[in-house]
Structure formats: C-alpha cells, structure tokens
C-alpha cells in the first residue's frame, strides 16, 4: 500500500519547501504498508525513507520524543535539550538550530500549537520568538544533501494544526517556503482498504465503505470492535451504534410496524393520521406512503445502495390552517409514540444571513463560539426524532443551503467542527408558497389544484431562491394540502367544542351542555371565512363563543351549565346559561 497523497505532497517538495503546515484530519490513523499509523508516525516513516535518520517530535503534552534511533537524536540534542522531557519553546528554538544545520539528518514535528493558542489569543512571548526563528529559517535556510551524492533537501519543520489560522497570518502567508497540506477524511478507496485490513468479509466491504462515509480510520476501527462486541450481523447496525449510540435499529422495532399496519387495534397509519387531520385524504395518503417507505428502509432504494440522507423527508405545501403542522405532530405520535418527540423551528426567525449560527453554532473567531447550535444540539440529544421546519420559504437562502448537506449526506457539521448525524430523523418542511395565487375555491378540481400548487413551489425554488438543487433533494416528497371545505369546517367546530367541554370539566368540574341548534349557529359564523382554515375557525370561535362563555361561567356556580343561546349585539357576543 502506497502513502496517501498528502504524504507524497510533503516528500515530493522536500527540495523546495522548508516548512509545512499540516491540517485537517490530523488526529486520525493512516493505513500504510507497515500498519495503521498516527499522523506523526506516518510522516516520520516517510521522511526516514527519504534518508532522514530520525524525526524529533515536540508536544506540550508528551515533551520531546524521537522517531528513529535515540542515539542519533541524543547527538543532535547534546547539551541543548533532554529527550523524553518537557521543554519550553525557548529551548525548542535551540533544538531548531541543531536540526537545520547543514550536516543534520533530522526533521522536526511541532504539534498541539492549536491547543496552546486556545481562543485565538496571541502566542506567548516564547512561542512568538520560536515562530520568528522558524520563519527566519524559511527565508535564510538552504538545501543540503542528506547523504553524499544524494538529493539536496531542506531540514523541514512540520507544524500539525487543526486549521492554518491557528498560526499567525504573518507566518503562513506570503512565503513560498511554507506549504499548507490538508489531510482529508478517508475517501471510498481508502475506506475499502480499511475494511479489508479490519477483516471484513468481501461481501461486507462495499457496505462498510458506503456506511462509513465521513468517518475517520479511528472510527472505523472502533466500529469493528463494536461489531465484535455486540454481535451485530449487519454493518449498518454497527455504524449506527457508533454514530448514534443506538445498539438496535429503532425503525425495525416490532411495535412501530404494529402501529403502522394497525395491529394494535387503532387502525392502520392512514386511518390514524386521517382521524387527526380532517379533509386532507390525498395528503394523508401521500404522507403515509412516504412514511411506510421510510419505515421499510426503501428511501433511495433505486440508487442501489442505502441512502445516506434522513430516514424520511416530507414537504407540506398548502394554505395556512389546513393541517400541515397537525399532520407532522400526528406522524410524530404514530412513529415515536410521543407527540412531544418532535422539534419545531419557526423559520421566520431565520430570515437573516447570520442566523445560521443559531442552527449550528458560531464558528471559531465569531461571537457566540463555544455555544451549541439549536438544530445540531436537538438532533444530538434525540437522534431518533422528527424535525419540523415551519414556513421554510421565510428562511434566508444561505440558511437553506444547510439543508443541502442534511438531505444529501444525512449529516451536518456544527460550529465546533463536530459532525451530527441526521440519518435516523424524519425531516418535515411546511410552506405557504403559491397559495396567494390560488384563491379559495377558485380551483375545484383536486388534481389541478395540486398541479398548480406544486408548480408554484418549483418556480419559487428555481427562480426566487435560485436553489433548484434543494428542490431536487426533496424530490417527490412534496405533499399538497387543499383548502378546507365547509363540511370539514363544521366537523372542526364540533371537535373544538368537544375540547372546550373537556377543559371546562377538568378546570371547574362542571358539565357544559351545548344544544345542537346553538352548535349550528356557532358553526355558521365560524365557517363564514375559510381562508385561514382551522386556525381561522379557532380564532372566530374564541370571539363568538369562548370569550362570552368565560364571562358567563365566572358567575355560574352550578355543576351543570347549559348554553341557552349565543347572541350578538353590535358586534359583541353574549352567552346565556341556565
């Protein structure tokens, strides 16, 4: 097995580059011919193959160490610094002088400077002076042969940092003698090689490489251990256990399937959802199909491999107050057995560009860095949950770009650089886009209404947001909701009045009776304007009945309250009880 490209980048430039800033996935293991090595180990091995006798390694945590013969290192360090001991940066500057001498066959790795400069504070005087010494070597150092007749190399100093900005700008910018080298996460070929090295069967190799996308070699080694310890038969289960801490697959729990197919006696999913969301049979059917597809693990099955996105994605489009949020709550209760298992984000609060920091946390160097993001923290706490993004069209386009990564890869990197996994979540968007162009009852045919609504949604993504790629990620998961009919409106009035009776019983131990003729009178006024759907009906019900009912009940001291009448005088309503 050859060295990774980033290592070859270092060794190929030894004749022209004095120092390297190595950043990125530097805390990982790297699979090479001699085994899985740490970043300092693999750098040292590659440099020794180029003729360097040893490589010194300095870390504030471990002190000064050596890769290679200790006697060679001790000759270099004689009288300057002790091997295996902690030394300060002032003494490390003296080590630098020895390392960069023409007859030296030694290189130097400097590690954990990022942590030494926590919070981007200025380097200490000693570290500042050491950095100046290193920069001086970049500008004045020369190449010399390692061995007689061999190629002429600089004696390199290699900095291991989290990001290049951990070093001062004056040090890493504007100098040809300093090269930045990024260490990437393992690509698919590397992951296949790791799978084989870890002893996975050949038929498991491709599945492991696919499921471990975005993970380090260290993580893949841990997954191998988890698989052996837990006896996981499927690679995906072992990866899930590592990513989420879930040793089983919640989507395969028998009780979930029983709720979906109705074996618990409550009816199948479509029936249960239809009882919660009135007047939207087509939307409920469409949402149920997507939900069943998610439960069966068939999302993206046409791709030939397990989809890396969320378990399910739903985009609810339609007028306000017609059941979009209610359907999201109903799905939550059905799938997770608890309506409170969903997390809602009102996207009108994310209309400014900077508000993306609220979702994922502020990056280093910005106000608020160190605080967890609202979205990433919610998914980290509850990886098996429903996430509702209400009125998504009100979010800033740059905020919406975050959803590309979630929908495509099923993960998101927060402001602290940690990756949060969305692969077991249900993502629900709601939107009112296009409704203003479809006045109530103007399109009586359901199929035509849906076609015009979906066309408006597509136009909004393509021409207003200029994010057609986000529309492509959503695919056929757009669920159209219709305006409510008068008949559905009357049913909602009856349901709301039942809730009022229940609340009166619970709060005041009082039975509230409402004759049918009064209910009819209330319903006529509540459905007079259906443009706001169920929400508008509830608001009208407050005005017409609940407010005057409260005034009447506060003076009523009987265990039974019968509504004799509801009357209106100059726009004011009054409830008469007996």
Image: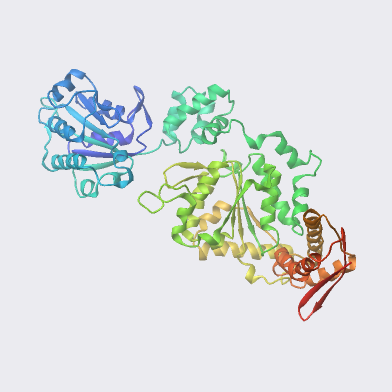
For residue 88, what is the image quadrant? Answer: top left
Question: Can you say whether 402 is above or below 56 in the image?
Answer: below
Residue lying furthest bottom: 570
Task: Give x and y (percent) for residue 121.
Answer: 28, 47
Depth order, front residue of 541/442: 541
21 vs 383, left or right, is left
Task: Give x and y (percent) for residue 268.
Answer: 77, 44
Question: Can you say whether 331 is above or below 161 in the image?
Answer: below
Question: Can you say whether 574 is above or below 354 in the image?
Answer: below
Task: Give x and y (percent) for residue 27.
Answer: 36, 33
Q: Can you see residue 233?
A: yes
Depth order, front residue of 105/327: 327
For residue 76, what is the image quadrant? Answer: top left
Assign the N terminus to one quadrant of the image. top left
Depth order, front residue of 475/27: 27
Depth order, front residue of 358/291: 358
Point 76% across, 79% down: residue:
571
222 vs 543, left or right, is left
Point 62% across, 58% down: residue:
430
For residue 150, what is the image quadrant? Answer: top left
Task: Give x and y (percent) for residue 244.
Answer: 54, 36
């Amino acid at each position: 097995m050859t060295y990774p490209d980033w290592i070859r980048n270092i060794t190929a430039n030894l004749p022209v580059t004095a120092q390297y800033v190595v950043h990125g996935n530097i805390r990982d293991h790297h699979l090479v011919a001699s085994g899985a090595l740490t970043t300092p180990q693999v750098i040292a091995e590659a440099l020794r193959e180029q003729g360097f006798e040893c490589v010194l390694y300095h870390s504030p945590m471990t002190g000064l160490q050596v890769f290679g013969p200790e006697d060679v290192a001790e000759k270099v360090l004689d009288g300057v610094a002790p091997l295996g001991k902690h030394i300060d940066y002032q003494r490390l500057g003296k080590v630098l002088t020895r390392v960069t001498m023409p007859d030296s066959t030694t290189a130097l790795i400097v590690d954990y400077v990022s942590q030494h400069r926590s919070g981007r504070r200025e380097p200490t005087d000693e570290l500042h002076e050491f950095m100046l010494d290193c920069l001086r070597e970049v500008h004045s150092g020369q190449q010399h042969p390692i061995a007689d007749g061999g190629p002429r190399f600089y004696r390199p100093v290699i900095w291991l940092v989290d990001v290049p900005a951990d070093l001062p700008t004056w040090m890493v910018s504007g100098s040809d003698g300093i090269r930045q080298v990024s260490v990437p996460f393992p690509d698919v070929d590397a992951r296949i090689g790791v799978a084989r090295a870890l002893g996975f069967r050949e038929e498991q190799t491709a599945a492991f490489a696919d499921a471990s996308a975005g993970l380090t070699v260290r993580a893949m080694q841990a997954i191998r251990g988890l698989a052996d310890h837990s006896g996981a038969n499927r690679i995906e289960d072992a990866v899930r256990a590592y990513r989420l801490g879930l040793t089983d697959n919640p989507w395969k729990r028998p009780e979930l399937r029983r709720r979906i197919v109705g074996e618990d006696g409550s009816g199948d999913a479509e029936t249960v959802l239809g009882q919660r969301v009135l007047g939207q049979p087509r939307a409920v059917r469409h949402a149920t199909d997507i939900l069943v597809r998610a439960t069966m693990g068939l999302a993206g099955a046409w791709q030939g491999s397990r989809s890396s996105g969320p378990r399910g994605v739903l985009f609810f489009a339609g007028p306000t107050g017609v059941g979009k949020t209610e359907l999201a709550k109903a799905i939550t209760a059905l799938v997770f057995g608890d309506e409170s298992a969903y997390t809602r984000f009102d996207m009108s609060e994310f209309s400014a560009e900077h508000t993306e920091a609220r979702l994922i946390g502020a990056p280093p160097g910005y106000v608020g860095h160190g605080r967890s993001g609202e979205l990433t923290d919610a998914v980290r706490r509850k990886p098996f949950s429903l996430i509702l993004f209400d009125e998504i069209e009100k979010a800033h386009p740059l905020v919406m770009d975050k959803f590309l990564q979630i929908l495509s890869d099923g993960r998101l990197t927060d402001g602290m650089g940690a990756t949060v996994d969305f692969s077991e979540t249900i993502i629900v968007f709601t939107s009112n886009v296009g409704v203003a162009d479809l006045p109530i009852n103007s399109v009586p045919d359901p199929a035509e209404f849906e076609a015009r609504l979906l066309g408006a949604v597509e136009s909004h993504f393509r021409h207003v947001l200029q994010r057609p790629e986000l529309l492509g990620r959503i695919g056929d998961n757009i669920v159209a909701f219709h305006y409510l009919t008068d008949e559905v409106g009357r049913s909602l009035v009856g349901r709301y009045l039942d809730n009022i009776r229940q609340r009166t019983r619970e709060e005041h131990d009082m039975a509230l009776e409402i004759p049918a003729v009064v209910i009819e009178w209330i319903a006529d006024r509540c459905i007079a304007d259906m443009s706001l759907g169920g929400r508008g009906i509830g608001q009208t019900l407050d005005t017409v009945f609940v407010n005057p009912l409260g005034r009447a009940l506060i003076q009523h001291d009987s265990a039974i309250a019968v509504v004799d009448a509801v009357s209106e005088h100059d726009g004011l309503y009054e409830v008469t009880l007996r």
